[in-house]
């Protein structure tokens, strides 16, 4: 068990000032998820460290690591995104891979089970970016099409289907273990899968759209009720323009 340089109320071991990540690697990007953290070196190698009970470090184990551990598979990544106990990345060839917690189909490989090593996202899409959220993941292809996969409680998949129409039952709700196209035919430059059951994206024209849970104004369209109802709450199963 590791100990931090300080002790903080509520969280225990910690550091209130920046500490260098060990290993002497040269990084181009880092992404912190709900558990572990991952980084990308200038050579495109992925390393992860921290909490690992669901295999979110991607090194084939479920053992926590206090130092960067290389992600299995030898892939050369262009980008990484840390979700809630899982991680996704896009290789320099545009292939998407995910690893870690997968009980809600958020790994995108057609099944709803966890994996301690990277698994290929199904469908053969060529992605420019992916975003891992709580239990759902979204990505943008080179053609600007947005795809999402994983849990669909409040329409966060964005395909316009009722939330009880998913092909798999994942716990109390339905899910999509493989990517499905976001409705509306919009051309996206980027998407962000949220941690409160909603997703947002920016089009190539600079317009912002959101879909999923509408409570607390999360869709940005001026209302909290949503144009639809999903599992008893306001939602939108398709992208709505942010005002």
Image: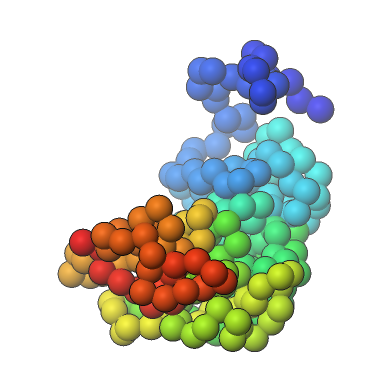
Q: Residue at x 65, y 86 (%)?
A: 167
Depth check, front residue: 202 or 21: 202
150 left or right of 240?
right
111 left or right of 193?
right
Quadrant in the rendering for residue 239 = bottom left
* Residue 156, image x, y percentages: 48, 69
Depth check, front residue: 190 or 89: 190
In the current view of this chain or complex, which residue is farthest to the left?
205
Res 51 visible: yes
Q: Residue at x 54, y 25 (%)?
A: 20
Depth check, front residue: 194 or 79: 194
In the current view of this chain or complex, which residue is farthest to the top?
6
Q: Residue at x 44, y 67 (%)?
A: 234
Q: Quadrant of the N terminus?
A: top right
Relative to 89, does residue 66 appear above or below in the rendering?
above
Relative to 164, does residue 8 appear above or below in the rendering?
above
Q: How many marks?
A: 0
* Residue 10, image x, y percentages: 67, 23
Res 120 visible: no
* Residue 206, image x, y percentages: 19, 64
Quadrant in the rendering for residue 169 = bottom right
Relative to 7, does residue 167 appear above or below in the rendering?
below
Q: Quadrant of the C terminus?
A: bottom left
* Residue 56, image x, y percentages: 68, 53
**Coloring applied to the structure:** rainbow
Q: Residue at x 57, y 57 (%)?
A: 134
150 left or right of 171?
left
């Amino acid at each position: 068990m590791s100990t931090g340089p300080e002790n903080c109320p509520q969280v225990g071991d910690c550091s209130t000032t920046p500490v260098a990540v060990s290993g002497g690697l040269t990084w181009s990007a880092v992404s912190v998820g709900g558990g572990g953290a991952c980084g990308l070196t200038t050579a495109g190698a992925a390393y992860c460290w921290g909490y690992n009970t669901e295999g979110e470090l991607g090194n084939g184990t479920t053992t926590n690591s206090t130092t960067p551990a290389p992600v299995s598979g030898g892939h050369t990544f262009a980008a990484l995104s840390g979700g809630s106990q899982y991680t996704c990345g896009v290789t320099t060839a545009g292939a998407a891979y995910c690893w870690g917690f997968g009980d809600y189909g958020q790994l995108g490989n057609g099944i709803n089970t966890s994996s301690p090593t990277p698994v290929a996202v199904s469908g053969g899409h060529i992605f420019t970016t992916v975003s891992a959220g709580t239990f759902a993941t979204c990505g943008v292809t080179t053609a600007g099409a947005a795809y999402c996969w994983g849990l669909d409680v409040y329409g966060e998949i964005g395909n316009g289907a009722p939330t009880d129409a998913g092909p798999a039952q994942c716990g109390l709700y339905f899910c999509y273990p493989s990517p499905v196209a976001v409705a509306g035919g919009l051309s996206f430059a980027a998407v962000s899968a949220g941690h409160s059951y909603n997703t947002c994206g920016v089009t190539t024209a600079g317009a912002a759209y959101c879909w999923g849970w509408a409570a607390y104004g999360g869709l940005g369209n001026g209302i909290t009720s949503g144009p639809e109802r999903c599992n008893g709450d306001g939602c939108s199963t398709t992208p709505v323009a942010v005002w």
